[in-house]
């Protein structure tokens, strides 16, 4: 369903790109449970397997399918890899976005939701971060998301696609790679290994469970107030990396030691503090988190336990 002129239209068909990834699996599962018709695409393990960088695949195959909305999650997100191979990052994150925007335009979709990132803000000049904060990208990944946002805005302006841009802080949950911070902290705690904290864990972010992001996506699909807007996504709560590690220790009853390490580079010596103001998300869409930080960690701990045996 979709809200239009005060009424809800049923049977909304949603194309989710990057659907086999960590966040894509959560969004797909959530939307299916909420009664949406979901069509998934990714490189593999999806309804439609293919590369969004392949113009022929997108414009000759994807475009011919019937869908009413797009949730564009597909991207290369590893920061280190983006520095080592910026060309591939821009190819996937920007040319892939351009292709799927063209497909959406040809399909006359009702909604296009673009997964941007809090990384577009870089080191924010003031906290909490508001949507009006200036772009300050640092890595090729960050720049690719800035470019992606401008591509989305250009199609909204010239092709009249109803778009929404989501700038997310740290999402965690099941299916995330085990080398990512929170799953790795959990694994260390379960194994009784030291928890590595670079720069003493002084950096801060706003970590939240993936189902909350899926709820935001649902609201953006349903509510007319989301059209043409940019939203910060998080809980509005600042947590240090050290605090996150300590909470995981508590929930796992672990004796693991916090291993205080120096920063990985001189550029990271100044702690990176960043957390969002989500008042706009609450005011316009009526958003409230559906899963608490602690409950999200508990679910993720259970998943890591099952994965590592």
Image (cartoon, rainbow, N blue to C red):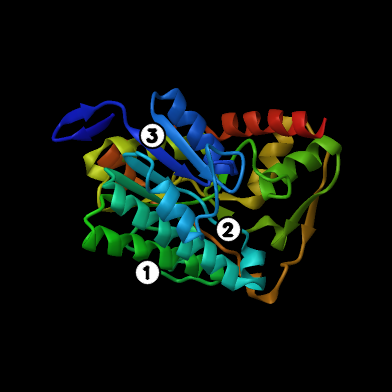
Q: Can you see residue 290?
A: no
Near-viewer residue (11 or 55): 55
| Structural distance between the alpha carbons of marks 2 and 1 | 23 Å
Residue 76, disc: 2
| Structural distance between the alpha carbons of marks 3 and 2 | 28 Å
Q: At x 64% / y 44%, what residue is drawn? A: 244
Dot 2 falls on a residue whose secondary structure is loop
Near-viewer residue (225 or 257): 225
In this view, the mark in front (3 or 2): 2
Q: At x 42% / y 41%, what residue is drawn? A: 15
Q: Is residue 286 left or right of residue 257?
A: left
Circle 1 residues within 10 Å: few <14, some 14–19, many ≥20? few
Return the disc, 3 or 2, that comes first in the chain's sequence.
2
Residue 118, horizontal then vertical, whole percent: 47, 58
Q: Which residue is label 1 attached to?
A: 134
Q: Residue furthest bottom?
A: 266
Disc 2 + disc 1, Cβ < 8 Å: no
In this view, the mark in front (2 or 1): 2
Q: Is residue 75 left or right of residue 34?
A: right
| Structural distance between the alpha carbons of marks 1 and 3 | 26 Å
Dot 3 falls on a residue whose secondary structure is loop
Near-viewer residue (209 or 20): 20
Return the disc, 2 or 1, that comes first in the chain's sequence.
2
Circle 3 residues within 10 Å: few <14, some 14–19, many ≥20? some
Dot 1 falls on a residue whose secondary structure is loop
Q: Is residue 189 left or right of residue 246?
A: right
Q: Residue furthest right?
A: 192
Q: Which residue is label 3 attached to?
A: 288
Quadrant of the rendered structure where residue 261 is?
bottom right
Does 5 appear above or below 119? above
Quadrant of the rendered structure where residue 245 is?
top right
């Amino acid at each position: 369903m979709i809200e239009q002129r005060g009424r809800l239209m049923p049977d909304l068909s949603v194309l989710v790109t990057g659907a086999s990834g960590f966040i894509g699996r959560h969004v797909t599962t959530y939307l299916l449970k909420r009664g949406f018709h979901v069509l998934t695409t990714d490189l593999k393990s999806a309804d439609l397997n293919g590369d969004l960088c392949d113009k022929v695949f997108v414009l000759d195959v994807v475009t011919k399918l019937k869908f009413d909305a797009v949730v564009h999650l597909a991207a290369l997100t590893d920061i280190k890899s983006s520095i080592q191979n910026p060309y591939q990052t821009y190819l996937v994150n920007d040319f892939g976005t351009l292709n799927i925007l063209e497909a959406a335009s040809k399909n006359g979709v009702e909604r296009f939701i673009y997964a941007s990132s809090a990384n577009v803000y870089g080191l924010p000049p003031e906290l909490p971060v508001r949507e009006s904060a200036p772009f300050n990208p640092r890595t090729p990944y960050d720049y690719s998301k800035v470019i992606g946002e401008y591509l989305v805005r250009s199609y909204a302006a010239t092709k009249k696609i109803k778009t929404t841009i989501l700038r997310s802080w740290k999402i965690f949950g099941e299916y995330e790679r085990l080398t990512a911070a929170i799953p790795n902290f959990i694994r260390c705690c379960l194994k009784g290994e030291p928890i590595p904290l670079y720069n003493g864990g002084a950096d801060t972010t706003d970590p939240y469970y993936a189902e909350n992001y899926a709820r935001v996506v649902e609201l953006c699909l349903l509510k007319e107030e989301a059209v043409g807007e940019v939203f910060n996504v998080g809980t509005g709560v600042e947590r240090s990396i050290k605090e996150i590690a300590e909470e995981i220790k508590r929930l796992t009853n672990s004796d693991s030691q916090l291993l205080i390490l120096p920063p990985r580079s001189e550029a990271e010596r100044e702690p990176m503090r960043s957390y969002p103001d989500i008042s706009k998300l609450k005011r316009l869409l009526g958003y409230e988190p559906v899963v608490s930080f602690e409950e999200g960690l508990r679910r993720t701990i259970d998943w890591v336990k099952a994965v590592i045996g």
